Amino acid sequence: MTAMNRGRKHVGIIVSVPGVLAGVMSVAAFCAVSACPAAANEATTAPTTQPAKEEVMLTICYDNNPGRENLKPAWGFACVVRGLEKTILFDTGGDGRTLLANMKALDVQLAEIDLVVISHIHGDHTGGLWDFLQARGGVPVYMPAGFPAAFGERIEKLGGKAIVADESTAVCEGAKTTGTMGKGQIEEHGLCVQTPVGWALITGCAHPGIAHMAERATRLVESPLNLVVGGFHMGGASRQQVEAVIEQLEKLGVATVAPCHCSGDNTRKLFKEHCGKSYTAACVGTSLRFPSQEHGEEPRPSSP
């Protein structure tokens, strides 16, 4: 397959590499740090868990792909977004105790979480919410349309504020949902996050299709995505289906991909094979860092 993005300018960094999604390497690809076994394109040191000044940082605190030994892998997904106006918890995994323990191990303080975004109704993304709300106290919880009324009522009883984000909704400066997709099926939304080097899209499971969600996000932010990370929901996909999605993402101008959770081992393998350095292995504990380019800072791996 042809690399359609070769040579595309991106915050002054131009990288020519072979394979799909090549051309401009996002800062995330340089700065992804985790202890994923045999992780590609990643430093081997443990991640620094606090973002530097003027830096946006995405930390996967719940995932079924194993990472550092002091983190528990479990089926589900959760990611903390730091460095914006507010700190966001995107999804809550399937088990509250695991979520809270992993957050503590990653030096994520409950008090710093300002709001929660839930991608969809499935328990491996909502199961940790109740323990989180009991421990943290009431915060706004954004969810797509289609949730039962009882879900929102339970949030309110725990002191939170249930917010249905049917259309694209700004949850804070630099972060907005894609709007509800997959209506009448499995309603889901993703989260678009503005970083110093471009926009990132975080998905929970991408039931509406990862390429469709990336296309929606690209239209919303009016720019090619620097990164797509999260569940791609392609565990049973054939090689032909995976390659078709890779081609769609390439046409959209996606610079870097980091599939995890329900993406499937074979899908991750194929993305790595086709995307080369534009693929970043992701697992529980992975931190994707986007340093500020204002002062000409070079992308750098974090260290303990």
Image (cartoon, helix red, strand yellow):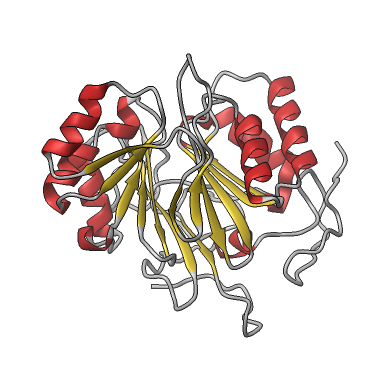
| Residue located at (37% from left, 70% from top) | 50
Counting labels gives 0
Residue 225 falls left or right of residue 83 = right
Q: Quadrant of the C terminus?
A: bottom left
- The answer to which of 99 and 156 lies nearer the viewer is 156
* Image position, residue 146 (x, y; %): 38, 22
Residue 238 occupies which quadrant of the picture?
A: top right
**Is residue 64 depicted above or below 171 in this figure?**
above
| Residue located at (76% from left, 72% from top) | 12
| Residue 264 seen in the figure | no
Residue 97 falls left or right of residue 204 = left
Residue 174 falls left or right of residue 147 = right
| Residue 235 seen in the figure | yes
Extreme-bottom residue of the structure: 295
Residue 42 occupies which quadrant of the picture?
A: bottom right
Q: Quadrant of the N terminus?
A: top right
* Image position, residue 215 (x, y; %): 67, 37
Residue 293 falls left or right of residue 285 = right
**Is residue 119 depicted above or below 302 in this figure?**
above
* Image position, residue 90 (x, y; %): 38, 45
Extreme-top residue of the structure: 184
